[in-house]
Structure formats: structure tokens, C-alpha cells
Amino acid sequence: MESQRRLAVLCSHLRQVNLGISSCSKLPITEDLPGISTSSCFTTKGHGQDLKDSEKKSEEKNCIFCKIIRGESPCMKIYEDEVCLCILDLNPLTNGHSLIIPKCHFSSLRSTPPSVIASMFSKIPLVSSAIMKAANCDSFNLLVNNGAAAGQVIFHTHLHIIPRKACDRLWNSETFDRQPLKLDKETALLAGCIREQLSINNNCEDVNGKL
């Protein structure tokens, strides 16, 4: 069972499923929803994307989330505004598992502008509250898989809202005994390295802001 759960995390979103009608809200699939943006995602220049323009356009063309945003692939929409779209995950780990997706294509959290990240996270209280009520639960996990080693398989920034219930045993890691942090020289070195990187990043942002 645990291996199936882990596989579900890695394979989530990969299958394009023609969803039917929600038993709760009777929402239609994407093509019947008039509010979904069909504009191109090719509007992200100046945001420090790592990919070259040609590679970036190819990535956007084949990205399942961009296809959903353009209205080319079906989804079950639960919320939308000018910046982001919230849909039910096509391969949910729990009932009500949802995604918050920016409408413009950014391959990772690092490449996503702070203003877009702020907009996405500002929707969490509203959307999660509605999801928990509909799923009849009082807890949820907020998850970001950033990078392949962290389980990211769709390289378009997105947030997972995963409703939880007591004793659902979604992840065995939740039962692991956690070891207290050792306040030793190695830990102090790690903390110092992080502070140094933060200082470098802040200085780079200050320089870029003056250019």
C-alpha cells in the first residue's frame, strides 16, 4: 500500500482523464466553463527563466497545465482569478486533493516571480476552507514538489492542497521518530552557510533592482 501511495505522488497529474460531473457541485469539465483563460502562456519574459526562448515555448506547448489553462485539456475547475487556477487533481491522494496553478508558465518555484507566489498563497485560506468543508475533514497538507528529487513531475509551478483525516495513514513517514537537532559545530556550519546564501541572494536582488 505504501509503495502505491509513493507511486501516486510521483505519477500524479500524468494521466489526462476525462472527468465526469462532480457529485457535489455538478461542475462541468473545462471546455464547458466559460471563465477559463485561453491566452498563451508565452508572456513571462523578464522573470529570469533558465530556459532559452525556443525551449521555453516548446515546454509550454507540451505542458499539461498550460493545455488546461488554454482550454485544450479537460479539468474540474473549483476556483479561478486573473493570476491562478485551482483544479481537482486528476490522480488524487485523498478526496478533494486540489492544485493551485499560475496561469503563466514557470518551471519551478525559484523561477516564479514573488508577486505570483504571493497571489497563489493568498488563495490558500479561502480555497482550503471550501475543500475541507466539501471533503468533510478539518485538516490538510500544503505541499510543493520543487525539483525532480522532491517528486516534481510536471514542471509548471503548483501547490497541492491535500485534505486529511485522522488515522488515514497517507504517509508512513508521519509515524517515524524524529531525532532532535544536534546543536553542534556541523549544525552551526549549516546555519552559517544558509545565512551566507541568503545574503548573496539579497545582494543580487538589490543589484538587479537598480539595473
Image (cartoon, helix red, strand yellow):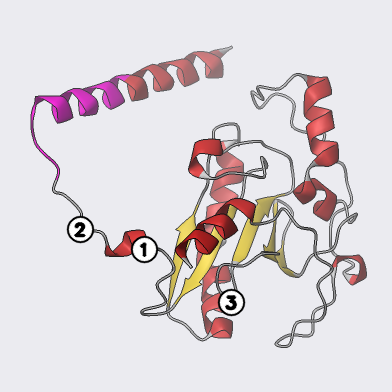
Among numbered discs 2 and 1, the one appearing first in the sequence: 1
Of residues 157 and 179, the one nearer the viewer is 179
Residue 95: image tag: 3
The three-letter amino acid code for the residue at tag 2 is Asp
Residue 158: image tag: none
The three-letter amino acid code for the residue at tag 3 is Asn
Relative side of 136 to 183, left or right:
right
Residue sticking out furthest to the left: 184
Disc 3 crowd rating (10 Å Cα; few below 14, some 14-19, many 20+) is some
Looking at the image, is 163 positioned above or below residue 188?
below
Counting from the top left corner in percent of width and height, residue 149 is at 50, 37
Disc 1 crowd rating (10 Å Cα; few below 14, some 14-19, many 20+) is few
User: Within the magenta stretch, is there residue 121?
Assistant: no
Marks 2 and 3, how far apart at CA: 28 Å
Looking at the image, is 145 positioned above or below residue 171?
above
Of residues 36 and 75, the one nearer the viewer is 75
| Cβ atoms under marks 3 and 1 closer than 8 Å | no
Marks 3 and 1, how far apart at CA: 19 Å
Where does label 2 land, which residue?
A: 177
User: Within the magenta stretch, is there residue 189?
Assistant: yes
Counting from the top left corner in percent of width and height, residue 116 is at 61, 44
Where does label 1 land, which residue?
A: 172
Q: Residue at x 47, y 82 (%)?
A: 137
Mark 1 secondary-structure assignment? helix
Among numbered discs 3 and 1, the one appearing first in the sequence: 3
The residue range painted magenta reads 181-196
Q: Residue at x 34, y 59 (%)?
A: 173
Looking at the image, is 208 positioned above or below residue 107?
above
Q: Residue at x 73, y 87 (%)?
A: 23
